[in-house]
Image: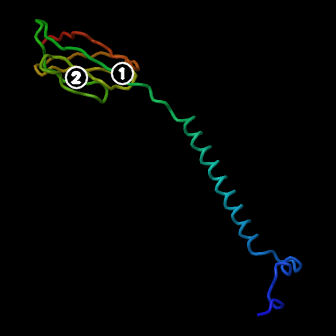
């Protein structure tokens, strides 16, 4: 085998052709540049989302007890906005997680009567209504 007819690196350079490994290097540099740019964009989007997302206020609570005029606990349905639940056997109720805001509270004892009032739920605080007396 003779080397006279084989291509040489010098022949590629003098003929203006680039060696094949230089194209691979350019492709890798381009690929790494695109990946780096995408990473920078992704980091920017994450920071923008974290900076502009709405922060939720902590919820508030509400409690009280429903009794008749003679002090007997009344089993009642208590409604606060979209939230509702019955009182316990001692006439007491507790809502642990109500978003802050103004609400109408309706208390309807099973034996009749009704009590309605507007209340303000404050973020991170429990509103204590105490003993609510309803005549039946």
Q: Where is residue 126 in the image (x, y as percent from the top left)?
A: 33, 16
Above or below — where is 12 with respect to 126? below
Q: Which image quarter holds the N terminus?
A: bottom right
Q: Where is residue 111 in the image (x, y as percent from the top left)?
A: 10, 19
Q: Where is residue 96 in the image (x, y as percent from the top left)?
A: 30, 24
| Residue occupying image coordinates x 28% and y 28% | 83
Helix, strand or loop status at disc 2: strand
Q: Where is residue 98 in the image (x, y as percent from the top left)?
A: 34, 25
119 on left or right of 47: left
Q: Based on the displayed image, in which of its 4 quarters is residue 72 positioned? A: top left
Above or below — where is 120 with respect to 2? above
| Residue occupying image coordinates x 62% and y 50% | 39
Do tag 1 and tag 2 residues touch (Cβ < 8 Å)? Answer: no
Q: Based on the displayed image, in which of its 4 quarters is residue 116 positioned? A: top left
Q: For the view shown, which residue lies furthest in the top direction?
A: 70
Above or below — where is 97 with respect to 118? below
Along the polypeptide, which appears first: circle 1 or circle 2? Answer: 1
* Disc on res. 60: 1
* Disc on res. 108: none
* Disc on res. 78: 2
18 on left or right of 125: right
Helix, strand or loop status at disc 1: strand
| Residue occupying image coordinates x 15% and y 19% | 109
119 on left or right of 112: right
Above or below — where is 40 with respect to 70? below
């Amino acid at each position: 085998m003779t080397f006279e007819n084989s291509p040489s690196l010098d022949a590629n350079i003098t003929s203006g052709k680039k060696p094949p490994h230089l194209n691979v290097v350019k492709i890798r540099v381009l690929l790494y540049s695109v990946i780096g740019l995408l990473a920078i964009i992704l980091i920017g989007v994450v920071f923008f989302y974290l900076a502009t997302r709405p922060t939720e206020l902590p919820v508030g609570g509400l409690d009280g007890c429903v009794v008749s005029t003679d002090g007997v606990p009344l089993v009642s349905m208590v409604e606060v906005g979209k939230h509702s639940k019955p009182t316990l056997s001692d006439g007491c109720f507790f809502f642990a997680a109500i978003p802050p805001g103004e609400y109408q509270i309706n208390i309807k004892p099973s034996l009749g009567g009704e009590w309605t009032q507007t209340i303000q739920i404050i973020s991170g605080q429990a509103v204590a209504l105490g003993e609510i007396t309803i005549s039946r």
